[in-house]
Amino acid sequence: MLSRRFFLKAAISLSSAAYASSLLACDISTLKKNLAKIFDSSSSTAKRLDFVSVAEESKNSKYKKGDRCGACSFFNAKKGEGDFAPCSFASNRFVPSCGWCKQYKKDPKKGA
Ligand code: SF4
């Protein structure tokens, strides 16, 4: 189920020019067929991962500017749809490319 918080964050971010580029990368409308498979950012798994749907909002000390799901080894872009893709840490649910969690592992083959 889609998190109300996710939509709120997206809406807040949409109003910020600073987040414009990352938001374009996280357009929920690009997820159509697998909308029901989106990762619930309010789930216990998300809390355990310290997951945020907008990476720049992370307060975790491991987060570094530029880190995001879309550049992570666990973001399975081959099975992705739009700006979302399944992640094994997120129970193979779809995470946004502009999200982040503390299991982030930079994939050198993916852009920053
Ligand atoms: S493991 Fe990587 S792709 Fe998965 S939620 Fe964390 S940062 Fe995103």
Image (spheres, rainbow, N blue to C red):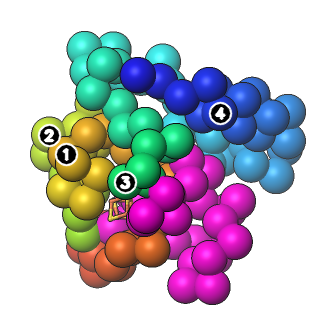
The residue lying at 26 percent from left, 40 percent from top is 93
Q: Mark 2: give few (<14), some (14-19) or many (20+) Cα within 10 Å.
A: few
* Residue 62 highlighted magenta (yes or no): yes
| Outermost residue toward the top in this view | 33
Which label is found at residue 79?
2
* Residue 6 highlighted magenta (yes or no): no
Distance from Cα at disc 3 to Cα at disc 4: 16 Å
Mark 3 touches mark 4? (CB < 8 Å): no
> Is residue 96 at all visible to an observer of this figure?
no
Mark closest to the chain's N terminus, 1 or 2: 2
The residue lying at 51 percent from left, 71 percent from top is 67
Amino acid marked by disc 2: Lys
The stretch in magenta equals 47-72
Which label is found at residue 26?
none
Distance from Cα at disc 4 to Cα at disc 1: 20 Å
Which circle, 4 or 2, is nearer the viewer?
4
Which label is found at residue 5?
4
Secondary element type, mark 4: helix
Q: Mark 1: give few (<14), some (14-19) or many (20+) Cα within 10 Å.
A: some
Residue 5 at x, y = what percent?
65, 33
Distance from Cα at disc 3 to Cα at disc 2: 21 Å
Residue at which label 3 appears:
45
In the image, 8: left or right of 37?
Answer: right
Q: Is the magenta region chiefly helix, strand or loop?
A: loop
Q: To which quarter of the image does residue 39 belong?
A: top left
Amino acid marked by disc 3: Thr
Which sits in the foreground, 4 or 86? 4
Residue 73 at x, y = what percent?
24, 69
Residue at which label 1 appears:
92
Q: Mark 4: give few (<14), some (14-19) or many (20+) Cα within 10 Å.
A: few
In the image, 35: left or right of 12?
Answer: left
